[in-house]
Image: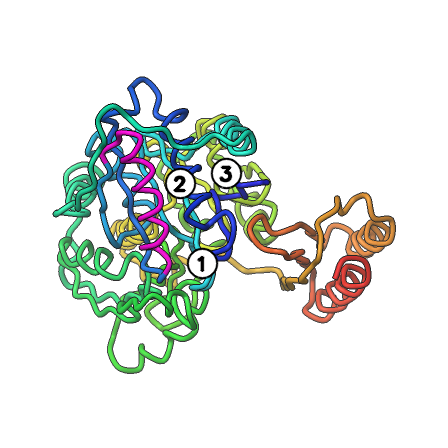
Amino acid sequence: MTLFGTDGIRGRASRAPLVPEDLGRIAAIFASQLIHGKSREGARILIGNDGRRSAGMIEAALAASLTFEGCEVVDAGLLTTPVLAHETRLRGFDSGIMISASHNPAHDNGIKFFSRDGSKLPDEVEQAVEKAFEDGLRPRPAEKPGFHRRLADTGTAYLRFLQEEAFPGLSLKGIKILIDCANGGGSILAPQVLEAFGAEVTSMNDRPNGDNINRGCGALHPEELSREFEKDDYDLALCLDGDGDRSIFLDERGRVVHGDALLTLLALHLGGTGALPGQCLAVTVMSNLGLKKVLSQAGLQVEETPVGDRAVVAAMRRKGLALGGEPSGHVIFGEEHNYTGDGIYTCLKLLGVMQETGKPLSELASCFSAFPQLLVNVEVKEKPPLEGIPEILETWKKIEEELGGDGRIVLRYSGTEPLCRVMAEGPTETIVENAVRRIVEVVQNKLA
């Protein structure tokens, strides 16, 4: 069984491997193999969740196995993935586990594992977990069982880090911010953090009930927030996804500022202030050609990676970069933020740029002009290598030849869902729509 996708273990809750027996085995493997430099007995593990109905079942199964193995399990409750990662590091836990399916609908769930430094597990460790799972490793009792308790002050170490280390001089007094919490992990912490810096905050979709996470709200549906700007004068709006690592913004006019525009304006600002090592940032193959065009004209370079924040982080670490991200709004800052994608941190960083330049978000974001782009998800029954299917490869190459240097095709499978993602960019919407239609037809004929 392939356990790990592009971002941890993810799938339909209450279906393998997200069932108690499998979860217990996974936790046992984690306890026995992944807590380095310390006996599993007495190891401290922090667990959080983003509010899905299935979170309690998953945590109970993990905690039962971990305490059986002798670990101390601490429940942090509702919080975002980046806060879980930072609290793990800042509080000296041996590891962290986030129960979340990020931007996926409520019926899905998953597990993300973090090392004691707050970083995600490397590929070789995930491969070792999968092998041990296939080999049938099961929980074994410790001489002295561990225990399970609740963390009373979730998020305080993270907030202290932001106020004392990351943004010590930042004051948001007089700033009015609208937050869409996506009925997820940021529903409590995101407003609290921004209010702690002095902002006047109005929050929406901050009532998770187990089933409403990401439903018609948050970073996946930022346009739903625009009508709220008619009710008050906001300086910007922040739209999080379910687990809080993505951030999509609306400017003071209520217009959506997507991830590539955000990356562009941040790169231009950091590059102009000498804070962009190598005058380079890392983006994935899904970033819009408009980003590359603007940055190239400014003398900045782009390191292109496969899709996924793990690939972006790997490139940033390898080249010593300070900025990277994806068009989804997953923005990653380097050593300054421990290579963590974090919507709250990104919002504070953006507000700092606005204060430093004296410019509203609409003016900062005007540097970016997107090429027409269309992404269509095609449900597939299986995922054979796309390059090995002659009909798909032939259509793909033919369309790219027609586009020349004025466009491109990106064709890939989702790492977490049975989908083939078909994306095209080009000089006009008509050309892009035609290109996507032609490839979708072939993909459906061969794989649907």
**Residue 402, placed above or below residue 314:** below
Q: Residue 428 occupies which quadrant of the picture?
A: bottom right
Residue 367 appears in the rendering? no
Residue under circle 1?
A: 103
Amino acid residing under circle 2: Gly
10 Å neighbourhood of mark 2: few (<14), some, or many (≥20)?
A: many
- Please name the predominant secondary structure of the magenta segment in the image: helix
Cα–Cα gap, marks 1 and 2: 25 Å
- The label on residue 312 is 3
The answer to whether 429 appears left or right of 117 in the picture is right
In magenta segment, residue 61:
yes
The percent coordinates of residue 167 (x first, y second) are: 20, 43
Depth check, mark 3 against mark 1: the one in front is 1
**Residue 147 lies in quadrant:** top left
Figure label count: 3
Q: Is residue 28 magenta?
A: no
Which of the marked residues, 3 or 1, is nearer the chain's N terminus? 1
Question: What residue is rendered at 41% in x and 24% in y?
Answer: 33
